[in-house]
């Protein structure tokens, strides 16, 4: 059981913390053995595994909250605040229930003698390998505060990159969703009424109108089946994308989408170079850094290329050679990395690459609406024209025969 306490040290200063004990009496004894005079000793409520999972699903920990967590930790450690006290302060002020629970568990682990990196490693859902490795390197070098500040900046940049992806995809997805809904309503409600009019007046309709009328008749009777099929296709697609083979195929498809593919490519290159620069600045060996970056770049194609580069470096080669042979890395990137390897300024070069492709991503995403708008208008216009032409021709025949 875990007990939280308030106690006074020999100088009369108030101390707070937690201890593991079998009973409150044992907790008091442990506190006294530390040279403290206990004032308040209370048993903490244990959070069950199921409750923690519910907290994670409900609250989660997004990149913005994680960035704030790291930045506050770095500020407190820079002010010479002990790690346990810093974790306590950050945990108390956060509004995220799941992050608060994780922080309490980390406090207990650190008090039991674990390092901060070991405590973080127990929560891989929140703290990725990159964060754990950076903290571990900071502990080994004595620059823990600097490593945590690196993580805060890096997490914030990754959050902004992910936001750009979502922003780039929002417009086309919104337009396509609205078009599908309107098409469904037209085929389900409007076309069947026109079909009834044409049948009552015994009008001869062209073949393309018959096709639309048949589709409308089917939709009016079996709309529930259409919705069910759409839901099943969406769920099956999501399930397949989450599989290993599905993710590989989807990652390749994303890079081949016109306009959008360039945005993804620039984001992955920026993410790769930024994270690798952070790890190398933190003292992580280059092979280990490449392996970690391959896990956080979030694209199987780039992950494979980066792992090949790690194998190449492990055998005494250069990663620039692997990137030069990869279709996913522009030639200029491979050349800049080679210059960085030869000059010994690889981190500086990687940051220049990250800044350049970050700016390119900003430029394309700002112009994305302008680029996609005429394409979407043309596609929707063709669809509306087909629908209107198929409906108006029979109506024209009716009016001409009257």
Image: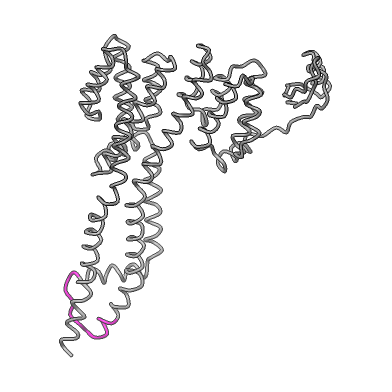
| Residue 342 placement, left or right of 32 | left
Q: Considering only vertical position in the picture, is 114 above or below 216? A: above
The image quadrant of residue 115 is top right
The x, y position of residue 26, in whole percent, is 81, 19
- Compare residues 57 and 287 and report the one nearer the observer: 287
Check the image and tell me how it is coloured: one colour
The image quadrant of residue 15 is top right
- Compare residues 393 and 283 and report the one nearer the observer: 283
Q: Is residue 43 magenta?
A: no
The x, y position of residue 278, in whole percent, is 41, 22
The x, y position of residue 17, in whole percent, is 72, 24
Residue pictured at 30% horizontal, 27% vertical: 353
Magenta stretch bounds: 197-208
Q: Is residue 206 magenta?
A: yes
Residue furthest top in the image: 316
| Residue 354 placement, left or right of 41 | left
Residue pictured at 73% horizontal, 21% vertical: 20
Residue furthest front in the image: 79
Q: Considering only vertical position in the picture, is 107 above or below 311? A: below
Residue pictured at 27% horizontal, 14% vertical: 318
The x, y position of residue 195, in whole percent, is 28, 77
Residue furthest bottom in the image: 402
Which quarter of the image is occupied by the C terminus?
Answer: bottom left
- Compare residues 106 and 47 and report the one nearer the observer: 106
Which quarter of the image is occupied by the N terminus?
Answer: top right
- Compare residues 368 and 210 and report the one nearer the observer: 368
């Amino acid at each position: 059981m875990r007990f939280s306490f308030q106690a006074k040290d020999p100088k009369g200063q108030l101390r707070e913390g937690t201890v593991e004990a079998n009973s409150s009496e044992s907790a008091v004894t442990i506190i006294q053995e530390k040279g403290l005079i206990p004032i308040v000793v209370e048993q903490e409520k244990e959070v069950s595994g199921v409750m923690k999972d519910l907290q994670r699903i409900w609250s989660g920990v997004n990149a913005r909250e994680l960035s704030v967590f790291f930045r506050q930790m770095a500020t407190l450690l820079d002010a010479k605040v002990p790690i346990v006290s810093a974790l306590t302060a950050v945990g108390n002020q956060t509004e995220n229930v799941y992050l608060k629970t994780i922080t309490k568990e980390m406090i207990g682990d650190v008090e039991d003698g674990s390092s901060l990196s070991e405590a973080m490693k127990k929560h891989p859902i929140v703290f990725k390998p990159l964060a754990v490795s950076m903290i571990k390197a900071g502990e080994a070098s004595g620059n823990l505060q600097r490593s945590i500040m690196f993580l805060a900046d890096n997490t914030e940049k990754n959050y902004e990159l992910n936001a750009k992806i979502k922003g780039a995809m929002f417009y086309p997805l919104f337009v396509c969703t609205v078009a599908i809904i309107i098409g469904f309503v037209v085929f389900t409600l409007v076309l069947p009424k026109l079909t009834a009019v044409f049948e009552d007046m015994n009008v001869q309709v062209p073949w393309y109108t018959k096709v639309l009328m048949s589709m409308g008749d089917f939709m009016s009777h079996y709309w529930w089946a259409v919705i069910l099929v759409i839901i099943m296709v969406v769920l099956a697609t999501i399930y397949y994308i989450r599989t290993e083979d599905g993710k590989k195929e989807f990652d390749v498809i994303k890079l081949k989408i016109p306009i959008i593919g360039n945005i993804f490519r620039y984001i992955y290159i920026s993410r790769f170079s930024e994270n690798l620069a952070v790890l190398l600045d933190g003292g992580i060996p280059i092979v280990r850094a490449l392996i970690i970056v391959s896990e956080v770049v979030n694209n199987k194609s780039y992950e494979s290329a980066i792992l090949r580069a790690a194998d190449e470096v492990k055998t005494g080669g250069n990663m620039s050679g692997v990137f030069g042979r990869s279709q996913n890395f522009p030639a200029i990137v491979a050349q800049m990395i080679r210059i960085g390897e030869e000059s010994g300024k690889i981190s500086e070069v990687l940051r220049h690459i990250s800044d350049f492709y970050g700016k390119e991503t900003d430029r394309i995403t700002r112009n994305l609406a302008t680029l996609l708008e005429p394409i979407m208008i043309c596609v929707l216009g063709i669809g509306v024209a087909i629908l209107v032409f198929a409906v108006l021709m029979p109506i024209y025949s009716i009016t001409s025969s009257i």
